[in-house]
Amino acid sequence: MKRISIDPITRLEGHGKIDIFLNDEGDVANVYLQIPELRGFEQFCVGRPAEDMPNLTNRICGVCPEAHHMAATKALDALFHVDPPPLAKKLRELFYSIFYATDHTTHFYALAGPDFVVGPTAPPAERNILGIVKKVGLDIAGKVLKMRRDGHHLIEMIGGRKVHPNWGLPGGVSHGIDEEQRKEILQLGRDAVDFAKFSLQLFDDLVLKNTDYLNLITGDVYVHRTYNMGTVDENNHVNFYDGLIRVTGPDGKEHATYPAADYRQYIAERVEPWSYLKFPYLKKVGWKGFVDGVDSGVYKATPLARLNAADGMATPLAQVEYERFFDTLGGKPVDHTLATHWARLIELLYAAERWVELASDPEITGKEYRVLPTETPTEGAGSVEAPRGTLTHHYQTDERGILTKVNLVVGTTNNNAPISMSVKRAAQALIRKGKVVSEGLLNMVEMAFRAYDPCFGCATHSLPGQMPLEVTLRDPQGRVVQRFSQT
Amino acid sequence: MNGEPKGKLALYWAASCGGCEIAVLAINERILDVDALFDIVFWPVAVDAKVHDVEKMADGSIDVCLFNGGIRTSEQEYMARLLRKKSKVLVAFGSCAHEGCIPGLANSTSRRRIFETVYHETPSTENTDHVEPQPSTAVPEGTLHLPVFYDTLRTLDQTVKVDYYLPGCPPEADRIWDAITAIVENNLPPPGSVIGAETTVCQECPRKRNEKKVKKFYRTWEIIPDEETCLLEQGLLCCGIATRAGCGARCPQVGSPCIGCYGPNEGIHDHGARMMAALASTIDSNDPEEIDRIIRDGIPDPVGSFYRFGLAASHLRRKKEAMIET
Amino acid sequence: MSENGFKPRIVAFLCNWCSYTASDLAGTSRVKYSPRVRMIRVMCSGRVDPSFVLKAFALGADGVLIAGCHPGDCHYIEQNYKTMRRHAMLRYFLEQMGIQPERLRLVWASAAEGQYLAESIDQFVADVQKLGPLRWSGVWEDPWRREDAFDEIAAEHAEAMEVQA
Ligand code: SF4
Ligand code: SF4
Ligand code: SF4
Ligand code: FES
């Protein structure tokens, strides 16, 4: 048996490593996605004052600190039994929509864009944002940079900082916005809507109108029939900030809809000795291993999953795109992993529309952005949709609000099992009888896990260069038989 | 480096959240200037160069290495040693590498307790077989390895020699740019220095200050502070008094106390000790019992409040656990 | 907890004004300072930064004593009240770090109370002796055989280097 070791040296709550084992026939026997790092927030936050959590858990991930900040803040609302005033909720959702639009932009253009726009078979040195610039024109780089800059600027304006905001409190937020700020936010929001429309058009022109790409998306290499998870509002429309968590099956049927506080009834996490990251699965279905189908508790929580789990989008333009998405791809649910990128752009449009809606609200500049909790804290859970999946924080405290128990089910963690499965699937399709198409394998495997946007590489991909993948073929003794890399 | 060949730059992260790398990108268009000035020879998330490429380089052949993240596993320590050897100038970039940051609060517990909690006790974990991650695991197809997880998180300079420190969690874009400019213009302070401002966050803070006298500390959810007065004077535990300037007092401007992310101000090694000294001047009582009450009622977690970012770098470094695994 | 023959290492920060006669006394009186006490004279107890105390523990002290003038008698007016507050905070913090707060002691003594100060020091030495050694640096030594782990990583990389694509 041979082993192929892919060491992407990239982040997934730290770094990640993929080992692919071949059987005696040279076909793929198994795939292991290993996460070699752990930080232990669930333990070292114990003993800390609960109100520190939005700031402590920020530091779990510098790519989506806003998501942790928000999930923590909502968990504090629940813990202190306080309902934030409507303005606080609006401000939080506004902030969160800006973050979403910024984050999705970065990920589409930095990660997925190169594959589709420049092409999956283009030389690796061109598969980056500079390649996109070459193909589409310098203008696009300016647009992407502006979107990122605007987003970070507003996140800092509202939440205090570009990375790691310091703003959320049980019962509200620490600061509001004034009229001048509102105007700027609104103006930049309109730009964001334009940018989202432009991005969808680009996807249309370059990807959907290209039969090769369309076949790649709808081909069977990247299909996974798993459960889908996402947060929905009272109309079962996608919502990032608040709502109920809905899970639908590979058959499209609803499996469950529940408030964050009930997560333990639906989610369980499995420990494997070969990874520091746990593997969540649907408790009522059960863990059947790394397999898909209705009988396997594996689920995904991605832009694609959110679209599958919902009945539509809450804003008009995004709703049109939502319908077109399912029409084009043959109805719900869509199980093609690569369609996640398209779903992400639809979410980008939704986030931008929501941003404009909220910034147009005349009440948004009010002063009633927080109330003081009056009840004794006990226990509370809160969740948001992080760009990389449903993010749940759950705390218990003593009567002074000092943490006694902390549990965190983090966005990317949800997708720990499906990512492994997607990689395995891609590897199986691309490695036959011990033969590896070196260039193809690397990028196709990359594409499989990139679709999940597992907090790998992320924003940093806007520099020239590739995700550093390395594939090493090893015999069972661990000796290197052959090595491929992308340079 | 005027007219000279381009310098060689490396960036790496260890036990880090990635925010420092986002912060590097937050210098926006100026990233292109960096690209013009330096060959980026190693940056795992952005540039296609592998660890073994670095291993092959001659010692000292990297001009500057910006290293973020603390040291928690054998793999991270290995990389710290490797990059130290290959780099002329090693910069501890950001709070994690500099002083351990919030991940360093793990030094208030132990590896054993972290494993117990994460893999056994958290309510969503189903682990009746008592499985825990292992340095090596035999699977049907072969053996899988994981780096060793240490009991104590170390800062970069507790692991290898560090030439410069760039404070902040993450450092603000303008401060990053200042540092890059200083490197390019060869205008660096003496080795071992922190590249940053010398004063405290209070100096940058627009809030009105009178005499700081505090009879009672409030938790952030207990009061709504007024918009203009110093937060510490209002009884909120603001770390601005003992924290290095550089951010422009960002947090107090949105109504939140500074949590100390820039580390202690110039010349101070132990952030928490500085906080204690500063608060001792602020607490308004001369009666031992009352003093005790003010402190214990208002500051339920001294370690987390005084050493939120600096525990790993402090004199004591970690808490003594009754049950340390051997 | 006390170990046989354990001689605690003590660092004592003594305010110049009150320790002045006390150290004189040491020569003349029957009171014998433990030779394990390292005395550091400071101009005022208010000069003792919390970091001095923490550093002393980190570097191997089993106990730290601070001596200053009685409240109200500080030659720098209010400084020893500051010492009082620092002491309160330090004890609270040390407790949370797993160091018995009894390892830090604050003593008020006037210039005339040399005998009392000397006795207090002896008492402190005896109390710390009962607590046993602290050996703080042992707290952060990692039990893992790290060098072996590095060898493994290096070997893996070296192996990968031999082969070209
Ligand atoms: S210093 Fe802060 S931003 Fe940088 S890696 Fe550490 S936690 Fe993240
Ligand atoms: S203590 Fe805080 S609020 Fe007060 S001046 Fe300093 S930084 Fe500003
Ligand atoms: S105010 Fe304090 S916590 Fe906030 S950014 Fe500045 S140094 Fe960091
Ligand atoms: S002079 Fe003795 S304590 Fe101040």
Image (spheres, coloured by chain):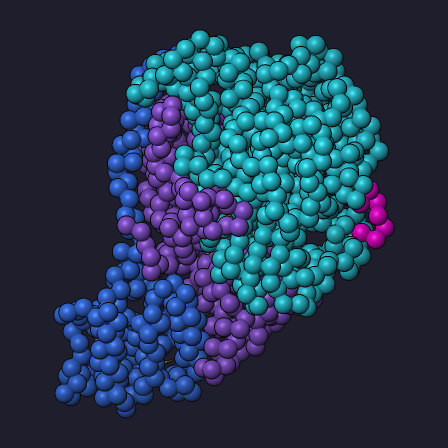
From this viewpoint, which residue is outermost toward the bottom?
A: C112
Q: Position of residue A366 (x, y in %)?
A: 80, 57
**Dominant SS type (magenta):** helix
Q: Position of residue A202 (x, y in %)?
A: 73, 20
Chain A appears what colour?
Answer: cyan
Q: Is residue C142 left or right of residue B171?
A: left
- Indicate whether A258 appears above or below A320: below
Residue A458's place in the image compared with B307, above or below, is above
What range of the chain is rendered magenta? A356-364
Check residue A360 for magenta coloring: yes
As drawn, the chain in purple is B
Instruction: Give the color of chain C as drawn.
Output: blue
Name the side, left or right, on which A372 lies relative to C74: right
In the rendering, at what x and y percent does residue A390 appear? Answer: 63, 40
At 40% from the left and 74% from the top, the residue drawn is C87
Residue B24 makes an appearance in the image: no
